[in-house]
Amino acid sequence: MTICKQNNMRYERKFRLDAESLHSFYFWLKKSGTRYGFKRAYEDRSINNLYFESKNFTAFDDNVEGYSDRSKLRIRWYGKSSNVNKPKLEIKTKKNAQGYKTYCAIKPFDINNIPKIEKLLSNEDKDIRYHLYQYPVPAVINSYDRQYYSNSQGVRITIDTNIRYRKPNKFNNFLFRGSYAILEIKYESNDYNIASHILSNIPSALEKNSKYVVGFSSMYHKMIV
């Protein structure tokens, strides 16, 4: 049986930044971010995600509609997008404004020959099995470069750039590249006040964003309303 883990409930606020806003944010982080104690938390690295969908695109529709209770299934690995090394299967569950992640280590596989999702994981947990059968269709692969910052109060900031998307059957040919960056602020409920203060002092106009929704709508010409 595969051993899976789960992190704590937390807020994850994602925002899109154009080139000018990203430059302003870096300036803020250098001048004002130190006031909040932000420092580099990890080395920069490339992240890859393979998202799975239902046959009726349920995860996409739930996200676009903004349902308070929703989930999505993905496989994440680091480094080259063509080399699935030390992958983890992740179920992201959102309940109202907070969410948590269940993640399980799985065996590497050939990204150009993706096995059926139920064959990637041996697990008897009913919730895990439900998601495997709920979202059986490989839908979108995205890749991006991430920078990590955190402070002693547990607030984390990540910045994603060089964001690109492709369908799983298009091999290494990325069909769409986003000319923007994604700023994400993550924090638990006991850090809500300090995180809100940080957000209110960021100089850029913050526009909400979901990389999965952007990628999926671009690949399948789905409308975002």
Image: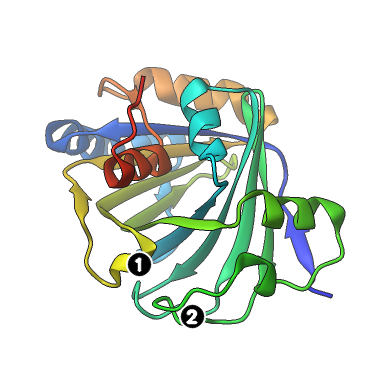
Q: Which one is in front, 157 or 92?
A: 92
Label 1 residue SS: helix
- The residue identified by callout 1 is 169
Is 75 positioned to the left or the right of 198 in the image?
Answer: right
The residue at the far left in this view is: 20
Residue designated by label 2? 85
Q: Residue furthest front?
A: 55
For image coordinates 81% across by 50% down, the residue present is 127
Query: Which callout, 1 or 2, points at the residue further toward the start of the chain?
Result: 2
Rendered image quadrant of residue 153:
top right
Residue at point 68%, 67% (across, down): 118
Q: Are marks 1 and 2 in contact (CB under 8 Å)?
A: no
Whether residue 41 is visible here, answered yes or no, is: no
What colouring does the structure picture have?
rainbow
Coordinates of residue 90 in the picture (x, y in percent): 62, 57
Q: Position of residue 29 (x, y in %)?
A: 30, 38
Q: Residue at x 26, y 72 (%)?
A: 172
Label 1 – label 2 distance at C-alpha: 19 Å
Q: Is residue 16 visible?
A: yes
Q: Residue 114: percent from the left, percent from the top? A: 49, 74
Image check: 120 left or right of 218? right
Picture disc at residue 209: none
- The answer to whether residue 103 is left or right of residue 196 is right
Q: Is residue 89 above or below residue 63?
A: below
Instruction: Sort mark 1 into few (<14), some (14-19) or many (20+) by Cα contacts within 10 Å.
Output: some
Q: Tell me: residue 170, above or below residue 65.
A: below
Q: Is residue 43 left or right of residue 86?
A: left
- Residue 45's spot in the image, x, y percent? 36, 66
Tell me the amino acid under the disc marked 1.
Asn
